[in-house]
Image (cartoon, grey):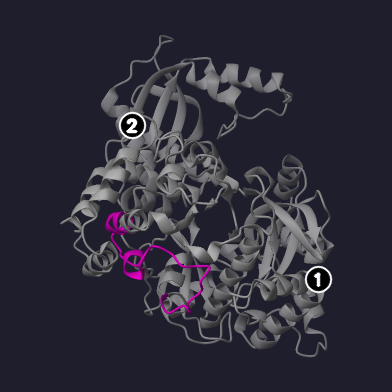
Amino acid sequence: MIPSYDPNDTEAGLKLLEDLTTNADAIQQQVLHQILSQNSETEYLRSFLDEESCNIQENFKNKAPVVNYEDIKPFIQRISDGDSSDILSAQPITELLTSSGTSGGKPKLMPSTAEELDRKTFFYNMLVPVMNKYVNGLDEGKGMYLLFIKPEIKTPCGLQARPVLTSYYKSEQFKNRPFNKYNVITSPNDAILCEDSKQSMYCQLLCGLVQRSHVLRLGAIFASAFLRAVKFLENHFTELCADIRTGTVASWITDSGCRDSVLSILNGPNQELADEIETLFNAKSWEGILKRVWPKTKYIEVIVTGSMAQYIPTLEFYSGGLPLVSVMYASSECFFGLNINPLCKPSDVSYTLLPNMAYFEFLPVDDKSHEETQLESRSRDDVARMDKDRLVDLVNVEIGQYYELIITTFAGLYRYRVGDILKVTSFHNKAPQFSFVERRNVVLSIDTDKTSEDDLMKAVTQAKLNHLQGLLLTEYTSYADTSSIPGHYVLFWELKSRYDNDPPKLDEKMMEDCCSEVEDCLDYVYRRCRNKDKSIGPLEIRVVSLGTFDALMDFSISQGSSVNQYKTPRCVKSGGALQILDSRVTGRFFSKRVPQWETLCLGS
């Protein structure tokens, strides 16, 4: 199910894409049959499949439940602990991929096999002909793609547990990738694989600046990471220019691989280039700075869908009108699909799911308030049966409808709820195209963090119990503030005195402790982003005057909300609601310390 083709051959790649999408239904059935055939003797599937059944696919569809992570966590924990039997996959599990979601304060772990790296390589290669169709001359220069690895976690049995991109960048498929004239990048492997993110960022930017005349495209995986690089440039451009001027590397770059690879690219002093770049960086405004520093750039490749859409205005400010291209839709669990119209507006991005990557099913999403009411009255087993009976195959989804994505993968996930809500926008041949709507239950996200309403409530409750002396927290909501880099969480709290109706007197130390307590209670990924990655700034609490949340309710009702059904939103995004909250702020407080984080050993 992994076709081979030369990614330098655009015509062959586009023909392969047409074949995959034209035969989407047949390929999906082949995928399901292959997954079930090779894994039918695993412990997990044996509990659902009948040995007597002559149709393994039909048997699976009738018997296998729709599951979430908590359902399969015990099986994955056994793999992590060293059980080598065929639990989920008949192929050996070679590593566990850490999801940005968490379970019980630890990252979710997704099984992966050696074959999955080949599948990811195929997926990346498919991006090449799509971009070549719309942008000419990409083989005549380089991409300044900023790629980073993240910390790895130890499992009791010795398997690596790490983010999916770290896994790929450390793989032989990436490090020893065949030459592809369309995908030459400015960053040497040693800089990408440097575990010190600051040294890695500095060295990759230095290489990109030295090779600026060859750069045809800029990018990073997520918009948040790319904007951190812009902020890093603002803080370090003088030092970077000094290195170009002298042909040396800053003394604090201690990683020998980074130093050696960058020095070979610097290739001696370049006074003229350093002066030219420094003049550009010293401009009064950085509006359009990316286009001025890298004048041959044709587009910026970053994911700007989902929670990353909040960064579009800032990217547009720096980009100088360059197109923002979101090329792929992927996760730790599986790589899903491509944007085959890459130069469309960010608001119009749709992804075409590649039918050979996994077996895809879709759970229709009804009105959310109705859905929640229905689920409250049913047992867990009833809900699982209801979900299974409502599943829709890939080619049978309907345009305009909303669905939750359900996947069955080659590596051992079966009818697994990814948690993404998608909307069908159109079809390309027989393959549907989806826009990403939201991540189910996520209210706050700045980078790879995904904080749910429940996570936020528990953290706020803990801070309230431990630190609010003489005060009552009457209401709260939140906001992901990305107006600065890095972005940060903002909590709006309405407080009143326990003893009188006067405006509360706020102790600055007490409120700062509240900020820190909330951060301490948030999950592993948030704390890693704050502590290790520095991709999220200090949490802020903005105290608002009494009656603010009444005004917020009045505003929502004026916009069409029902008085009877109104609930205070735990995250606000509309300009009107934010304006009401910010206009009534009486105090602002920030966390004064970084929350604790350390690499975990994932024992039972």
Count numbered badges in the picture: 2
Where is residue 176, by image quadrant?
bottom left
Residue ID at (72%, 55%): 434
Tag 1 residue: 22
Task: Say what amino acid the circle numbered 2 marks.
Answer: Phe
Report whether residue 358 is seen. Answer: no
Q: State the quadrant of the N terminus.
A: bottom right
The residue at the far left in this view is 251
Q: Is residue 425 left or right of residue 257?
A: right
Q: Is residue 386 left or right of residue 290?
A: right
Query: Looking at the picture, how far across and down is residue 436, in whole percent?
Result: 66, 51
Q: Residues within 10 Å of mark 1 (few under 14, many from 20)?
A: some
The residue at the far top in this view is 502
Frontmost residue, 372 versus 585: 585
Image height of 109 relative to 80, above or below = above
Query: Looking at the picture, how far across and down is residue 43, in whole percent?
Result: 61, 83
Task: Say what amino acid the circle numbered 1 marks.
Answer: Thr
Would you say the residues marked 2 and 1 are in contact, meaning their CB atoms lie under 8 Å apart?
no
Frontmost residue, 229 versus 564: 229
Tag 2 secondary structure? strand
Disc nearer the start of the sequence (2/1): 1
Report whether residue 257 is seen. Answer: yes
Image height of 238 relative to 334, above or below = above
Residue ID at (81%, 48%): 400
Q: What span is colored magenta in the figure?
A: 175-203
Query: Looking at the picture, how far across and down is residue 77, in whole percent?
Result: 47, 72
Tag 2 residue: 590
Q: State the quadrant of the C terminus.
A: bottom left
Tag 1 secondary structure? helix
Q: Is residue 188 magenta?
A: yes
Image height of 197 relative to 516, above or below = below
| Label 2 to label 1: alpha-carbon separation | 54 Å
